[in-house]
Amino acid sequence: DEMPSAGDKFYVVETLEKARDVVAERRQTAREAELATAPARTLEGMLSRIEAGQAKELALILKADVQGSLEAIVGSITKMKTAETRVNILHTAVGGITTGDVSLAEASDAIIIGFNAVPDAAARQMAEAKGVDIRLYRIIYDILEDIRKAVEEGLAPEIRMETLGRAEVRQTFKVSRVGTIAGCFVIDGVASRNAKVRITRNNIVVEDERSLDSLKRFKDDAREVKAGMECGLKIAGYDDIKEGDILEFYHRIEIARKL
């Protein structure tokens, strides 16, 4: 899906599927190399600068699913400050996280917080390339606790989310005594049978922390399905899946706190 540049080499492989696998692997390698050289703008990095006396505020960009949630979060966050550090909310809006949010975060050294709101593909890739930290939440209390600890204690949150991949729902099928089966196309990364699943519609979270009952590649059970491939899946206990929904596959990992 990209035009070759002058001097690029061409390689011949046995099948189209093999070619897609090679392209996906090369893109991942290139992305990792780019991320390795990008200056990370993370909450942990901001805390280190605050502790070293190089920063006096925690800058935030806040996106949420509805105006009521936004107002509740802003009202609570603005009360948080210490003699050494204050929280500065640079921008708030209803809707998904965009490339404009990432650009603002990069320019102002800010952290992006999404409450039931997620970045689109372009914003996600840009954030990774620029080293901008995007934190996603579904519970307001968790946002306030993380920020309180950052301001008062300088401790990093214990739990982080590791995104494995995303898939788009292309078709849905009602199956008697089974429920709704989603026919999907894996956009990037992998769709993993054992991962947690977040369901977003127009970059707004409609369901989260779901598991899969099944994941199939054609008629065969699959442990994971790679980017560029199609698959069929059943989400445990959830049938309100719609064409165009984005499924995000992720794991939660524990990070040791640092003083």
Image (tube, rainbow, N blue to C red):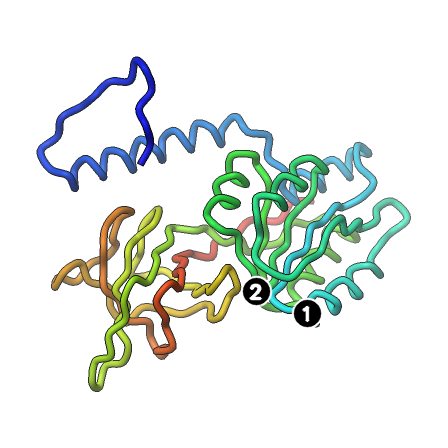
Q: Residue at x 46, y 65 (%)?
A: 201
Q: Residue at x 13, y 26 (%)?
A: 12
Side of 251 where 128 appears, left or right: right
- Residue 41 coordinates in the image, percent (x, y): 63, 38
- Residue 173 coordinates in the image, percent (x, y): 24, 74
Q: Nearer the viewer, residue 190 or 168?
A: 168
Q: Identify the image quadrant of the N terminus.
A: top left
Which residue is tagged 2? 116
Is disc 1 in contact with disc 2, using a CB cutoff of under 8 Å?
yes
Q: Nearer the viewer, residue 244 or 240?
A: 244
Picture quadrant where residue 44 is located: top right
Q: Earlier in the sequence, mark 1 or mark 2?
A: 1
Determine whether 187 is above or below 24 in the image. Answer: below
Side of 158 where 178 appears, left or right: left
Q: Residue furthest right?
A: 83
- Residue 82 coordinates in the image, percent (x, y): 87, 52
Picture quadrant where residue 236 is located: bottom left
Which residue is tagged 1? 69
SS at circle 2: loop
Q: Nearer the viewer, residue 139 or 248?
A: 248
Rendered image: mark on residue 81: none
- Residue 20 coordinates in the image, percent (x, y): 22, 39
Side of 29 where 95 appears, left or right: right
Amino acid type of the residue that numbered disc 2 sits on in the rendered structure: Asn
Q: Identify the image quadrant of the C terminus.
A: top right
Picture quadrant where residue 166 is located: bottom left
Amino acid type of the residue that numbered disc 1 sits on in the rendered structure: Ser
Q: Residue furthest front?
A: 3
Determine whether 38 is above or below 168 in the image. Answer: above
Q: Residue furthest top?
A: 7
